[in-house]
Image (cartoon, rainbow, N blue to C red):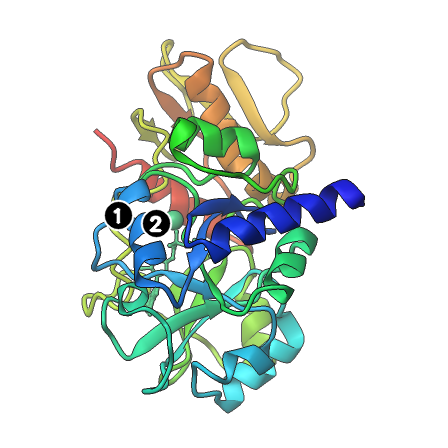
Amino acid sequence: MKFIQSNIKKAKKYLDNNHCIAVPTETVYGLAANAYSNSAVKKIFSLKKRPLNNPLIVHYYDIQRLRKDCDINDNLVKLYKKFSPGPITYVLKLKDNSKISKFVTNNKKSIAVRFPNHKLFRNLLKNLDYPVAAPSANISSRLSSVKPSDVKEEFGSKIKYILNGGKSKIGVESTILNLLEKPSLLRYGGLDTKKIENVLKKKLLININSKKKLSPGLFPLHYSPGIPLRVNVKKPKKDEAYLLIKKRKSKLKNHYYLSKVKNIKEAAKNLYSTLRKIKNDGFKKIAVETIPNKGLGKTINDRLKRASKYS
Ligand code: TXA
Ligand code: MG
């Protein structure tokens, strides 16, 4: 415990000095900086090689602290009570007098916010005087990181500090909702949309490929291991790694599986680490079998479809 506290202190010191560090969350690791500081936030964009027009998610300890920066609405309160802290991000109206850096939101009047559910990160947030901007800790368009060694693989010595919180429990990014108007889905993620619909007692509008570019980060190519990937494959080619939802009895060298039994949550948790492993094992191509499009299967399929745009 003492060890953990001293790591949190270290992380706080870096953030207080407007540096950019990696932090663990229950979804994926984040590349974190003081959301009120222009210079700190700019470091995120340059480290990640992210275009400045792609806004960042800001992480808060609780809704009390959010009130300074955002207008709170009824849908937010309903969903917050049920799902936060947890893998859900809300797009809300930014207050005029908020101190959020204009680089976080690309100078817009809306902001994406989230309350992460990881003990270490929550402990850190509680001790800070500012919220934390944090995109996923990966180079733009590549695979997100779910453990410290992934972050090192992405950024090498360029990253000043990684707060080690073990492997992310959910393994895919948060589900993003636009709450500025009628609730709509901007990104499939770690929280099943059915559960959200049950709380709102209505169907969500699906806006994941919005032409309005509400979520400019949702480029067609994303979440890529950096090698070609095909989906819905029944018979892989000889030189392809074959990614399966469930372990098979046959132990072919090119077979990789996402879950021991057919468990979609376990599959989501293992998605990025397995894709990373396939690449690190030296394969140059990946074929993926059909993943059931239900629950978190929708999130897995969204990520795989975007990864398949690599060429
Ligand atoms: O689970 C997560 O959400 C992780 C962890 C670290 O919290 N973060 C994450 O951030 O996935 P990032 O930057 O990799 O993805 C955030 C997405 C981007 O597609 C971005 O365009 C969108 O959220 N976004 C950010 N601010 C927005 C806003 N104001 N309106 C609409 N979309 C926004
Ligand atoms: Mg990302």
Query: For the N terminus, which image quadrant?
Result: top right
Whether the residue carrying mark 1 lies under 8 Å from ligand 1 is answered with: yes
Figure check: 299 above or below 260: below
Q: Are marks 2 and 1 in contact (CB under 8 Å)?
A: yes
In this picture, residue 239 sits left or right of residue 16: left
Circle 2 residue: 44
- Residue at 61% in and 11% down: 251
Choose top left, top right, bottom left or bottom right for residue 2: top right
Look at the numbered disc 2 and give the secondary structure of its residue. Answer: helix
Residue 242: image x %, image y %? 46, 21
Residue 172: image x %, image y %? 51, 47
Residue 267 vs residue 221, the one in the foreground: 221
Residue 280: image x %, image y %? 45, 17
Label 1 neighbour load within 10 Å: few <14, some 14-19, many 20+: some
Figure check: 181 above or below 133: below
Residue 74 vs residue 258, the one in the foreground: 74
